[in-house]
Amino acid sequence: MDALVSEQFGRCQYFLIVDSKTMKFEAVSNLGEQMNSGAGPKAAELIINKSVEVLLTGHVGDKAEEALKRSGVKIVDGLKGTIKVKDAVNNFLSK
């Protein structure tokens, strides 16, 4: 939870999937990170398969954004890579 938020959704090394009620989390490797192309959609597929409801990130590309929105994932983007995950989650929950 002390890791910094990634500014690039499709190219981050891993995702932290946080239960907002308990603040327990699971670290999941991003299989799309090393792909030459299609990293965003591959990452979106992983997020969708994990039944994520809200995605906090810096930027999501068009194809990944389309897939996430189609699956009902709320995207909160524009976060900078200088904020810790726990602070981003707490900021989101306090709104």
Image (cartoon, helix red, strand yellow):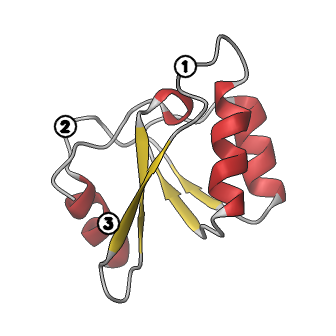
Screen quadrant of the N terminus:
bottom left
Q: Relative to 46, does residue 86 appear above or below in the rendering? A: below
Q: Alpha-carbon distance for marks 2 and 1?
A: 23 Å
Q: Is residue 95 visible?
A: no
Task: Give the answer, above or below, for where 46 lies relative to 52.
Answer: above
Residue 82's disc number:
2
Residue on which disc 1 sits: 34
The residue shown at (20%, 50%) is: 84
Q: Residues within 10 Å of mark 3 (few under 14, many from 20)?
A: some
Q: Are marks 2 and 1 in contact (CB under 8 Å)?
A: no
Q: Using the rendered view, name the quadrant where residue 25 is placed.
A: bottom left
**Could you tell me how far apart the alpha carbons at marks 2 and 3 are, in whole angstroms?**
14 Å
**Judging from the image, what secondary structure is the residue with disc 3 in?**
helix
Q: Position of residue 49 (x, y in %)?
A: 71, 61
**Mark closer to the observer (2, 1):** 1
Q: In the rendered image, which residue does mark 3 sit on?
A: 89
Residue toward you, 13 or 75? 13
Nearest to N terminus: mark 2 or mark 3 = 2
Please, what is the three-letter code of the amino acid marked with disc 2? Thr
Give amino acid for label 3. Val
Q: Residue furthest bottom?
A: 21
